[in-house]
């Protein structure tokens, strides 16, 4: 068994030495990809877990399975002042990662040809570990999680993911086809890639394997075929599998990375008018049960992508819907760091001065559809571009910007201002745009 495992790891290493992943051009920058920066910013999961805002300065971040280094670059851009460490079993990939970070001017980095189980050899501890598109290639995901936990600081956070058994099922079937044909006995190279393209192109268009796994741009796309039809070691899992692995590794689930897209209630036409048996049972279901039901009913996600950490490290907090007026008067309000940009400031000013809606989702797309804010209330966001602000100062800012009621022309009522700003912030916080801290 150990020999088979070593043989598989060697095949995976050879595959990524031959075709480092991702094949993103060296010069490509993620600076304008706000959504990717949001996901890779330690501020995001730390706030979800603790309802506190931290700075990324001096944090130490590991990119476990860094590949050619594009995600390492995203981590560097998303976490100003952090040290980025990357490891990968592919020497060719590590060399590319080094070049990429140097090209973009990041020098507080180091990269090593290293496997996950060798992590303790670095003699380092990490505030955040990004393990993207790696665990499902390992013979034992629990071993990978335990190796990362061993070098994770007590309050640190891990991002890890597994391939979905349901969403990915058609590609697993395709891989079985090409194993039967002998295309994956060794490390697939140009000839095997060409054969796969030829076979898929020769199938009738209504053949299910072609319908479910083939796209027109795959035919001459070696990267796509190696990452799907010919991916060595690929396998799928369910969320109960993942939660079981977390329990075995003694790690605690924090959140799905794209948690807004795992809302079970969003699958129903009218969540307020469910069949009686659902209305009674769904609210009582555990987080694991609700997420598993979602993947059974609507398996749209390729990755089961989660944040986790050491058990019992979440800081206690009072849910926002239980805050008193006194809590709000002491609250500190932050715009998510990925929205604190010159472009957001410029657009906000234009919207406020020209009485246009502020399309916040154009700057950071966190949910389906558009999210727009009326210019009359968006004015409160302007001070937040510079940094966190006390809630009362935002209320006062709104009153100064709108000193009289637009209909009655009476002076703006302080309680009305308090309520309007409060409701806007609650809504934006639930979407992930605003971070609210309750100061004791």
Image (cartoon, rainbow, N blue to C red):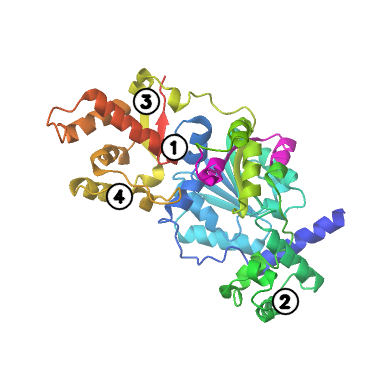
At x 50%, y 67%, the residue is: 25
Q: Is residue 184 visible?
A: no
- Between the C-alphas of marks 3 and 2, the distance is 60 Å
Q: Is residue 49 visible?
A: yes
**Which residue is denoted by mark 2 in the rendering?**
192
Do labels 3 and 4 touch, CB within 8 Å? no
Label for residue 342? Answer: 4
| Label 3 Cα crowd, 10 Å radius (few <14 / some 14-19 / many 20+) | some
- Between the C-alphas of marks 1 and 4, the distance is 24 Å
**Which residue is denoted by mark 1 in the rendering?**
430
The magenta stretch is 243-271
Can you say which quadrant of the picture contains the C terminus? top left
Q: Nearer the viewer, mark 1 or mark 3?
A: 1
Label 1 secondary element = helix
Residue 339 picture location, percent across and down? 37, 46
Label 4 secondary element = helix
Do labels 1 and 3 touch, CB within 8 Å? no
At x 69%, y 73%, the residue is: 207
Q: Earlier in the sequence, mark 3 or mark 4?
A: 3
Answer with left or right where residue 408 lies relative to residue 240: left
Query: Does 216 lie within the magenta span?
Result: no
At x 67%, y 35%, the residue is: 251
- For residue 383, what is the image quadrant? top left
| Label 1 Cα crowd, 10 Å radius (few <14 / some 14-19 / many 20+) | few
> Does 33 appear above or below 427?
below
Residue 298 picture location, percent across and down? 60, 51
**Which residue is denoted by mark 3 in the rendering?**
331
Q: Earlier in the sequence, mark 1 or mark 3?
A: 3
């Amino acid at each position: 068994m150990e020999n088979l495992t070593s043989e598989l790891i060697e095949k995976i290493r050879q595959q990524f030495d031959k075709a480092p992943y991702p094949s993103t051009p060296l010069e490509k920058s993620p600076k304008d990809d706000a959504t990717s920066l949001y996901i890779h910013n330690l501020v995001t999961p730390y706030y979800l877990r603790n309802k506190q805002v931290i700075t990324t300065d001096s944090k130490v971040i590991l990119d476990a399975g860094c590949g050619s280094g594009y995600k390492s670059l995203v981590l560097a851009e998303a976490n100003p002042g952090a040290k980025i460490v990357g490891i990968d079993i592919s020497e060719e990939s590590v060399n590319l990662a080094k070049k990429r970070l140097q090209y973009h001017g990041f020098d507080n980095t180091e990269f090593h040809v290293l496997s996950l189980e060798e992590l303790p050899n670095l003699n380092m501890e990490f505030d955040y570990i990004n393990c993207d598109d790696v665990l499902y290639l390992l013979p034992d995901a629990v071993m990978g999680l335990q190796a990362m936990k061993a070098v994770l600081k007590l309050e640190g956070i891990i991002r890890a993911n597994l391939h979905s058994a349901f969403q990915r099922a058609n590609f697993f079937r395709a891989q079985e086809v090409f194993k039967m044909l002998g295309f994956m006995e060794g490390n697939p190279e140009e000839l095997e890639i060409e054969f796969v393209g030829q076979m898929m192109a020769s199938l009738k268009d209504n053949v299910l394997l072609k319908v479910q796994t083939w796209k027109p741009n795959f035919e001459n796309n070696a990267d796509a075929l190696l990452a799907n039809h010919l991916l060595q070691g690929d396998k799928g899992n369910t969320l109960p599998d993942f939660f079981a692995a977390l329990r075995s590794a003694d790690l605690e689930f924090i959140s799905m990375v794209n948690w807004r897209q795992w809302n079970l209630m969003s699958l129903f036409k009218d969540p307020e008018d469910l069949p009686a048996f659902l209305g009674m049972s769904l609210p009582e279901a555990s987080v694991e049960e609700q997420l598993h039901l979602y993947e059974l009913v609507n398996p749209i996600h390729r990755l089961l992508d989660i944040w986790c950490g050491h058990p019992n490290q979440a800081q206690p907090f009072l849910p926002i819907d239980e805050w008193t007026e006194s809590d709000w008067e002491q609250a500190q309000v932050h715009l998510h760091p990925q929205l604190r940009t010159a472009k957001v400031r410029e657009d906000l000013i234009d919207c406020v001065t020209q009485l246009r809606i502020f399309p916040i989702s154009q700057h950071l797309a966190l949910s389906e559809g558009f999210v727009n804010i009326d210019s009359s209330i968006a004015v409160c966001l302007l001070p937040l571009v510079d940094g966190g602000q006390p809630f009362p100062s935002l209320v006062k800012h709104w009153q100064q910007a709108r000193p009289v009621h637009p209909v009655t022309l009476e002076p703006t009522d302080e309680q009305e201002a308090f309520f309007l700003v409060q409701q806007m912030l609650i809504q934006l916080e639930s979407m992930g745009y605003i971070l609210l801290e309750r100061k004791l």
